[in-house]
Image: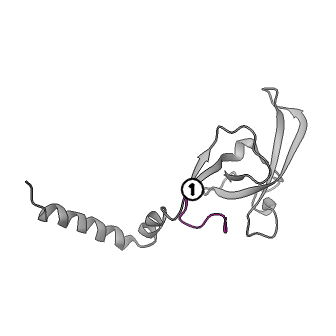
Amino acid sequence: MEPAFQRGDILFLDNSVVNVGVGDVVVFKIKDRDIPIVHRILKVHTKSSKQPNGEPVVELLTKGDNNRVDDRGLYAPGQLWLEREDILGKAVGTLRYVGMVTIALNDYPVLKYVLVGMMGLFVLTSKEG
């Protein structure tokens, strides 16, 4: 979701927000896909039909800040809008680049062994009291 967020940023999500609006950054998951997507809401469509709890059905259209077109090409086949159930949460905060440690450890598995070896070496060479 560049330029708003960079790879390695940790997002804080709030799923207690009932209403999301145009311009809100949300994390959503598409059916049959493992990786959630972070994009901004482009359009909100309120249907006249009601949910069982009496609230109106709200459909959302999203778009990445760096993308030229909306996300309909990313949605499941035949899906034109996201529903509230697809939204994992609304982004309310971020920690810049903190997640780069995990990305580095996953991209370079040797680094994990080096770190574990260094920690073991520190334990063996440390002096108590």
Is residue 100 within the magenta segment? Answer: no
Q: From the image, which quarter does the N terminus lie in?
A: bottom right
Image location of residue 113, percent across then percent down: 30, 69
Image location of residue 35, percent across then percent down: 61, 58
Q: Which residue is mark 1?
A: 94
Question: Can you name the residue that lies furthest to the right here?
Answer: 48
Residue at image location 53% in from the left, 65% down from the top: 8
- For badge 1, the amino acid type reads Thr
What's the magenta region? 1-10
Q: Is residue 55 above or below residue 77?
A: above
Helix, strand or loop at mark 1: strand
Q: Is residue 52 left or right of residue 122?
A: right
Residue at image location 43% in from the left, 65% down from the top: 101
Residue at image location 7% in from the left, 54% down from the top: 129
Residue at image location 75% in from the left, 61% down from the top: 74
Image location of residue 127, percent across then percent down: 9, 60
Indicate the colouring scheme.
Answer: one colour
Question: Can you name the residue that lies furthest to the top here?
Answer: 53
Asked whether 74 or 97 is in front, the reply is 97
10 Å crowding of disc 1: few (<14), some (14-19), many (20+)? few
Q: Main secondary structure of the magenta part?
A: loop
Asked whether 35 or 26 is in front, the reply is 26
Q: Is residue 122 left or right of residue 7?
A: left
Image location of residue 88, percent across then percent down: 65, 46
Asked whether 117 or 34 is in front, the reply is 117
Q: Is residue 77 above or below residue 100?
A: above
Figure disc tally: 1
